[in-house]
Image (cartoon, coloured by chain):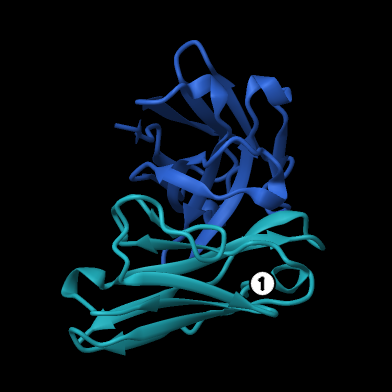
Chain colours: A cyan, B blue
Amino acid sequence: QSVLTQPPSVSGAPGQRVTISCTGSSSNIGAGYDVHWYQHLPGTAPKLLIYDNNNRPSGVPDRFSGSKSGTSASLAITGLQAEDEADYYCQSYDSSLSEVIFGGGTKLTVL
Amino acid sequence: EVQLVESGGGLVQPGRSLRLSCPTSGFTFSDYALTWFRRAPGKGLEWLGFIRSKAYGETTDYAASVKGRFSISRDDSNSIAYLQMNSLKADDTAVYYCARVAGVYQLLALLYFDHWGQGTLVTVSS
């Protein structure tokens, strides 16, 4: 069981907006550690989408945005496209474990 | 263009060892920390450990799940990172990925990963 909790799946129609939550605790997100988000299609290289809670690397469309509040973080995707269908992971650090931690991943299906 | 390409995966018997390689190009390898992950069938991403650059003493940190069995090393002259895996178990079956640690900070609490390889499959089975 992952230290960061994500919904196993979300779905949306093309053009819609979806959000993926990432819930942690007082030893990780709630302690102020940054949250980062990755997109992964099995068989390909994972891709950094959001770093330091709400920053996009160059080349990532502004349809992707991140936020953080308290012990949780969220990834929002607007204007959903078929190519967005993938697995999404949040990542942070846990001070109790002294480890980099990931959420369990969320499978996004574009209907 | 930054590139990382994992190699060395394959079928290995339980209890045996395997070393994965991650040759890189497109950036000054010696300046960056490198890290390894895996994704087991039907499961999510799991961080395994990382190695800092020479400027930070090439020190390493590992996840508790692999500490003592796995070790990470680097060859700055050839821009290659390695993952040595010993005493392999069936649970170690996964696709293994190497990645570059983003930015100049090499503190465990600040890590995130900006370039990844496509992975190499390791299957542990008799």
* Three-letter code, disc 1: Val
> Residue A16 at what x, y percent from top left?
25, 87
**Does residue B42 appear in the picture of this structure?**
no
Residue under label 1: A3
Vertical comparison of B94 with B57: above or below: below
> Does residue A28 sit above or below A59 in this rendering?
below
Q: Nearer the viewer, residue B6 or A108?
A: A108
Q: In screen coordinates, is A82 left or right of A30? A: left
| Residue at 71% over, 55% down | A99
Quadrant position of residue A24: bottom right
Residue A54 position within the rendered picture, expressed as x and y whole percent measured from the top left: 50, 65
Against B35, residue A105 (above or below) is below
Residue drawn at the location 69% of the way across and 70% of the way down? A29
- The residue sitting at 73% across, 52% down in the picture is B64
Instruction: Say if residue A12 shows up in the picture.
Output: yes
For the point 70% across and 46% down, which residue is it?
B108
Q: Is residue A16 left or right of residue B12?
A: left
Under circle 1, the secondary element is: loop
Q: Quadrant of the N terminus of chain B?
A: top left
For disc 1, the chain is A
Q: Position of residue A31 (x, y in %)?
A: 77, 68
